[in-house]
Amino acid sequence: MATFEDRKKGFEEKFRHDQELQFKVTARRNKLLGLWAAEKLGLAGDAAEAYAKEVVAADFHKPGDSDVIEKVMGDFKAKNVSVTEAQVRDELQRLFEAAKKQIMTG
């Protein structure tokens, strides 16, 4: 029975690790999206970093990416920045791969 319990604990640990890794990658991706959007909004330096933190925080409102996309698109609309939702979604996908690489190597 000990081997079954050991396997169970191993699976639980792997699941926990995978969930933690997914959270870190998503948070990093959202920060990178925030920095990308900040540049489009004409923000730099501390203002860009603060905006990126706002984008990361926006992800905690609803499950999925819709809250992040709504935040960025709303800010683009408010500042008359011509970026489509499809472009934001494409950027999210591109940045997911970059964030994953950063987390895995860093």
Image (cartoon, grey):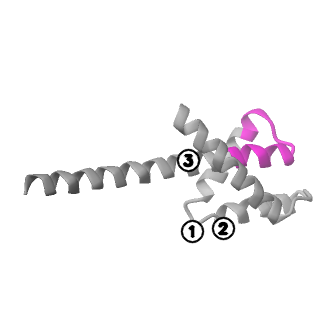
Q: Is residue 56 above or below residue 103?
A: below
Q: Are marks 1 and 2 in contact (CB under 8 Å)?
A: yes
**Could you tell which of marks 2 and 3 lies nearer the N-terminus?**
3
Residue positioned 59% across, 66% down in the render: 64
Say what secondary structure mark 3 lies in. Answer: helix
Q: Nearer the viewer, residue 66 or 46?
A: 66
73 drawn magenta:
no
Say left or right for 85 vs 22.
right
Query: Would residue 53 be seen by someone viewing this image from the given angle?
Result: no
Helix, strand or loop for disc 1: loop
> Which amino acid type is marked by label 2?
Ser
- Identify the disc placed on residue 62: 1
Three-letter residue code for mark 1: Lys
Secondary element at tag 2 = helix
Which portion, as a residue range, is magenta? 32-48
Residue 43 placement (x, y as % from top left)? 82, 41
